[in-house]
Image (cartoon, rainbow, N blue to C red):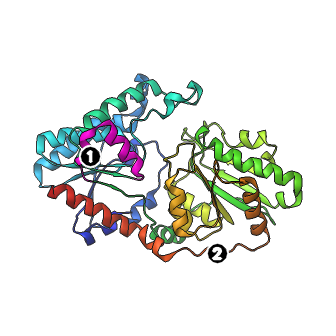
Amino acid sequence: MSLPYYAEFGWDGEVVTVHPKYSDFVKDDLLSEAIPGNIRIHYVKALAKKVTSKLGLGSIALRSLYFYYVKVAGLLKAQNYDLVYFSTTQFPVCILGYYWNKKFGIPYVIDFQDPWHTDYYEFKPKSERPPKYWFSYRLNRLFEAITMKKVGGLIAVTDTYISILAERYPWVRSVPSSTITFGAFKPDFQIAAKNEVKSFIKKSRGKIAIAYVGVAGEIMAPSLTALFKSLSMLKRTNHRLYKRFEWFFIGTSYAPPGTGKKTVVPIAKAFGVEDSVYEQTDRISYFEALKSIVTSDALLIIGSDEPTYTASKLYPYLLTNKPLLALFNAASPALEILQEYGAKYAYSYDKSADIGLKINDFLSALAAGEIGEQQYDPDAIEKYSAENMAKRQCELFDRVVDK
């Protein structure tokens, strides 16, 4: 989303990425259509997962680490580059910035779209912890500590991530940093519209389809509980209105296709509203996600129980201008962003008074046709555009190389 705008702000970008044939993530060939044709893309190999999984290692970051080091070291030796920018949640590769800096003196910037090392799951039951948590927790703690020793700049989707890093590594307080979220990128909708892209929303005649596309899991339980509790109340008090809606939760698990565990339906079942809820755990491609939200009648976006959580999917949802119901932790930066946009139906699931009534008022107005296409604040639209976010990234890059 930033690559089309870097040249405008004085930077030429090149990409180094794992070749798709080594990845088991959902493939989406259309993603490359938005990348300018003059951008050089360098591909690296990765160890075969069927081999490394025998050792308990399936991470694409660890499987490709050596190949990244060799490839980028060769590039840095052959040409003059000003900066290495890590923009990935496959954080283990970021440790290479430390070694490239020692060998070539090149500064590096890390974009924290999520926390790297975190104690979040330390306070969760073992049943809720990710697979191989013991190993990944210790690896992330070690790799992050090494990487932060020489980091040249920090970007994060929330200033809380930067504050935590500053507490953990006091010296990074003198490192250029900036809070920059994902931007709203309209061209993606044009790409989705002109290509044959599948929608996973199967609407029933006469019903209103409300869609959520993205991971769910235990972390979303509080927001889902607030939603389904209100639907349970609606089912008892106005069954006819309740039956007007069907809820689609698509791509709720990171597990391989066909192996995901449903985490939405069980909560709906606990409140007796599972008859209106459809959950698909299999992940879908980015453009399939866009097509699905475009073909729905209204959208739902939910936050996790982590106060600092902000959803990258927020901006595509807003770009559809469809009726939107949002439920986040009261401390989430997403609520502030939604307020700036002028989103009328964004609530904290933990602090909003009468949250159940607010949700059901939204549904009543939606069914009555009182909520149509949403018009958002133009200043917020400009502020959170992908172009403006790219500009702010480049401003930070300038600060790093001029330091």
Q: Amino acid at mark 2?
A: Glu
Q: Position of residue 169 (x, y in %)?
A: 28, 37
Quick check: is 171 in the magenta stretch? yes
Question: Image point 40% across, 66% down: which residue?
Answer: 386
Nearer to us: label 1 or label 2: 1
Which residue lies at the image location 47% right of the left edge and 55% below the top edge?
28
The residue singled out by tag 2 in the image is 373
In the depicted structure, whether residue 131 falls above or below residue 209: above
Our reading of the magenta stretch's main secondary structure is helix
Q: Relative to residue 190, is residue 301 drawn left or right?
A: right
Question: Does residue 196 appear in this view?
Answer: no
Does residue 149 show up? yes
130 shown above or below 177: above
Quarter of the figure that contains the N terminus = bottom left
Of the 4 image quadrants, the one containing the C terminus is bottom left
Q: Residue, x 76% and y 73% (percent of image)?
A: 369
Front residue (pair 82, 19):
82
Cα separation between marks 1 and 2:
44 Å
Task: Say which amino acid is labelled 1.
Answer: Arg
Residue that appears at 55% across and 58% down: 335
Instruction: Looking at the image, tell me whether mark 1 or mark 2 is earlier in sequence order.
Output: 1
As drawn, is 228 to the left or to the right of 183? right
Q: Give the magenta range.
A: 157-176
Residue 173, numbered label: 1
Callout 2: SS: loop
